[in-house]
Image (cartoon, rainbow, N blue to C red):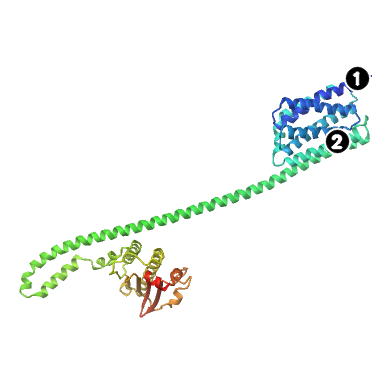
């Protein structure tokens, strides 16, 4: 009678108190807000499941399965929680704790032969310890159920739960210590240790793989950052070069403007002085001593003017197309600074070129031609030791809407065939990869129908000639 009484007390205790513990574990670990309906459902339904298991012949494992399915359905459809893996993990966790509490109490009863009436207090003590552990570690448990290794952790919980259920079903239902119980308990402990070890190993491997992946991503990000930095540095260098080029062009234009102003002042002063000198030489002229007059005028002219400076920008004032004028000023200034003998002619006013050719392509060709002439002239001076052996002559010419550019320069005796000069990577400089006239050939290839280019070597002179056909002539051909 007394034993039946305590069994009923145990059943009542489990029906009332166990749902509260399960409810606390479930909501504390999940972090969900506990509502009144959740509490009512848990106490009533889980309590019914506990009583059903104790009052009927239904196996405890089957009762746990029914309870787990019901909690899942309630969470998913009533609470509208859509994280299926998290719900399964929470259910598995509190079901495992319930089972371990039951197994612990049964073991204590078998080992110490505790009076059945003390079971309630043992349950209370173990439940209190479980609540304390959950209260301290619920954040870590929640993290394990939600992090990238959550699938492994939930699988570990299910594995331990199934192993523990099998041991409980096979051994602990016998109310005495048996060899089967000892073996089963040992296997259970080994299974738990093995599961924990497997989990930690899997997590470490995954961390290592993730670390390697993160390192690869960091290296990739670093490479991308370096590429961006190099691109920005290249852009900055290009910007600096453009600024330097613009500054150089501005200086050359300012120099040209100063040159014009100075020449205008010199010519005005020369005119005034010449008038005075002519007045002073009237007597000599009237007496017929013309030789003396010419000699004095020639001496004065030579002392007042730098003949080379006067020819520095000769003809540039007739160029009104800004790009053609700019490249002419820049290259004539270069020839002047290299102290080369040169001449430049442009007798007609040039305001525009035929529209069939891009002005920037034309400027590139003219620039290359001038640079080649300057380079060959400097090489000739170095070879012969005399500046008088080098010379560059250039001209712009326009008639009836066409445009012609010609430049020629003296070359060394060991002249290279012109067909080789136009080959890519050809150069006359040692240890240097140049392009010769290959760039010119590549540009002019786009204008085969409207641009005629010839270059040749004859009698110690290299001549480069470019002609652009007028627009109306191109239209007639089309």
Specify the label residue 5 is tagged with.
1
Say if mark 2 contacts mark 1, CB within 8 Å: no
Q: Residue at x 48, y 53 (%)?
A: 233
* Label 2 or label 1, whichever comes before in sequence order: 1
User: Would you place residue 232 above or below residue 336 in this image?
Assistant: above
Percent x, y of residue 310: 24, 66
Q: Residue at x 70, y 36 (%)?
A: 143
Q: The residue tagged with tag 1: helix, strand or loop? A: helix
Is 282 left or right of 386, judged from the image as shown? left
Is 452 left or right of 310, judged from the image as shown? right
Q: Quadrant of the C terminus?
A: bottom left
Percent x, y of residue 92: 78, 35
Specify the label residue 198 is tagged with.
none
Which residue carries the number 2 mark?
165
Percent x, y of residue 93: 77, 34
Percent x, y of residue 83: 71, 38
Instruction: Locate residue 469: give its quadrant.
Output: bottom left
Task: State the residue in front, 473 or 414.
Answer: 473
Is 55 left or right of 372, judged from the image as shown? right
């Amino acid at each position: 009678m007394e034993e039946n009484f305590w069994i009923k007390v145990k059943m009542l205790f489990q029906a009332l108190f166990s749902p509260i513990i399960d409810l606390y574990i479930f909501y504390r670990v999940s972090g969900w807000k506990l509502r009144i309906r959740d509490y009512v459902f848990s106490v009533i339904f889980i309590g019914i499941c506990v009583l059903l298991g104790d009052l009927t012949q239904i196996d405890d494992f089957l009762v746990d399965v029914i309870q787990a399915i019901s909690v899942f359905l309630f969470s998913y459809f009533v609470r509208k929680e859509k994280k299926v893996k998290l719900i399964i993990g929470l259910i598995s966790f509190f079901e495992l704790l319930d089972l371990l509490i039951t197994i612990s109490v049964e073991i204590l009863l078998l080992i110490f032969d505790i009076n059945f009436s003390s079971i309630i207090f043992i349950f209370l003590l173990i439940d209190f310890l479980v609540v304390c552990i959950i209260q301290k570690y619920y954040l870590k448990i929640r993290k394990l159920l939600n992090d990238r290794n959550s699938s492994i952790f939930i699988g570990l919980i299910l594995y331990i739960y199934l192993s523990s259920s099998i041991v409980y079903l096979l051994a602990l239902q016998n109310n005495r210590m048996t060899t089967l119980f000892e073996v089963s308990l040992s296997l259970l402990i080994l299974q738990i240790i093995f599961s924990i070890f497997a989990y930690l190993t899997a997590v470490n491997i995954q961390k290592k793989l993730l670390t390697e992946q993160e390192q690869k991503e960091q290296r990739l990000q670093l490479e991308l950052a370096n590429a961006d930095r190099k691109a920005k540095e290249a852009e900055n260098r290009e910007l600096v070069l453009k600024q330097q080029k613009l500054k150089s062009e501005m200086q050359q234009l300012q120099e040209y403007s100063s040159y014009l102003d100075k020449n205008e002042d010199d010519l005005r002063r020369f005119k005034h002085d010449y008038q005075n000198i002519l007045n002073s030489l009237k007597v000599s002229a009237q007496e017929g001593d013309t030789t003396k007059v010419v000699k004095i005028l020639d001496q004065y002219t030579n002392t007042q003017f730098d003949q080379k400076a006067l020819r520095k920008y000769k003809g540039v004032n007739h160029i009104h197309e800004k790009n053609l004028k700019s490249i002419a000023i820049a290259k004539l200034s270069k020839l002047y600074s290299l102290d080369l003998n040169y001449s430049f002619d442009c007798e007609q006013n040039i305001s525009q070129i035929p529209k069939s050719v891009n002005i920037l392509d034309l400027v590139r060709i003219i620039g290359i031609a001038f640079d080649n002439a300057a380079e060959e002239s400097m090489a000739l001076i170095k070879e012969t030791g005399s500046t008088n052996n080098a010379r560059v002559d250039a001209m712009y010419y326009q008639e009836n809407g066409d445009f012609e550019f010609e430049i020629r320069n003296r070359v060394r005796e060991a002249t290279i065939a012109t067909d080789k000069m136009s080959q890519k990577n050809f150069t006359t400089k040692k240890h240097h990869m140049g392009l010769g006239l290959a760039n010119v050939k590549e540009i002019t290839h786009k204008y085969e129908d409207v641009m005629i280019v010839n270059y040749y070597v004859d009698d110690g002179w290299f001549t480069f000639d470019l002609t652009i056909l007028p627009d109306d002539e191109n239209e007639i051909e089309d």
